[in-house]
Amino acid sequence: MNIRPITTEADYDWALAEVEQYFDNEPAPGTPEADRFNVLSALIENYEGRHWAIEAPDPIEALRFRMEQAGYTQADLARLLGSRSRASEVLARKRGLTMEQAYKLFSEWKIPAEVLIRPYHLT
C-alpha cells in the first residue's frame, strides 16, 4: 500500500490526487483499495483539521442559522423560550442563553449542545 504521511502542502496535493480516483470508481468494501481509500481519507482529514480547522459558530450565529434553515421565526423562538422579550434579548445579544434554554434548543431544534454552551459576547 503506497501511503505516506501528509506533512507538507505537496504531500496533501498528492493524497488528494490519489483519493480522487476512488470517487469515480468506488472500491468494494474489504478490498485493499478500500483500505487504501480509508487510510488516505483519514490522513487528509487529519491534515485539514490541523491546518484549516473550522471553528464552531457562536451560539447566536448557530441559532440564527438554524432559524433560517428551518424557516423558524422569532415568534417560534419566543414560544420555545417562553416570551417574546426573552427571544428578542437573546437574538440581540443582550441576554445570554440559560442552560434550560440551551437544552430546549438542543432537544427541540437539534442545535448541537456543544455549540450552544460555548461562551460568547453580549452587547
Image (spheres, grey):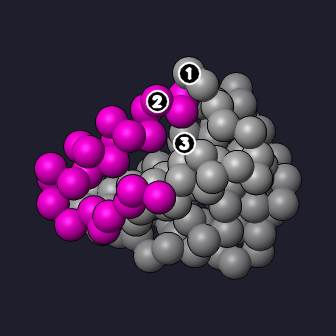
At x 30%, y 67%, the residue is 5
15 within the magenta span? yes
Query: Residue 24 or 115: which is nearer the viewer?
Result: 24
At x 64%, y 31%, the residue is 26
Pointer 1: what residue?
A: 24
Taking the image as shown, residue 22 lies to the left or right of residue 66, namely left
Image position of 46 with respect to 73: above or below: below
Query: Residue 15 or 101: which is nearer the viewer?
Result: 15
Q: Are marks 3 and 2 in contact (CB under 8 Å)?
A: no
Q: Quadrant of residue 107?
A: bottom right
Taking the image as shown, residue 83 lies to the left or right of residue 25, namely right
94 within the magenta span? no
At x 63%, y 52%, the residue is 32
Mark 3 belongs to which amino acid? Answer: Arg
Residue 64: give its label: 3
**Of callouts 3 and 2, which one flags the residue occurring earlier in the amino acid sequence?**
2
Q: CA distance from mark 1 to mark 3?
A: 37 Å
Q: CA distance from mark 3 to mark 2?
A: 38 Å
- The image shows residue 2 at horizontal and vertical percentages of 39, 56
- The image shows residue 113 at horizontal and vertical percentages of 67, 68
Q: CA distance from mark 2 to mark 1?
A: 6 Å
Query: Residue 98 or 43: which is nearer the viewer?
Result: 43
**Of callouts 1 and 3, which one flags the residue occurring earlier in the amino acid sequence?**
1
- The image shows residue 35 at horizontal and vertical percentages of 61, 56
Image position of 113 with respect to 63: above or below: below
At x 43%, y 32%, the residue is 20
For the C terminus, the image quarter is bottom left
Pointer 2: what residue?
A: 21
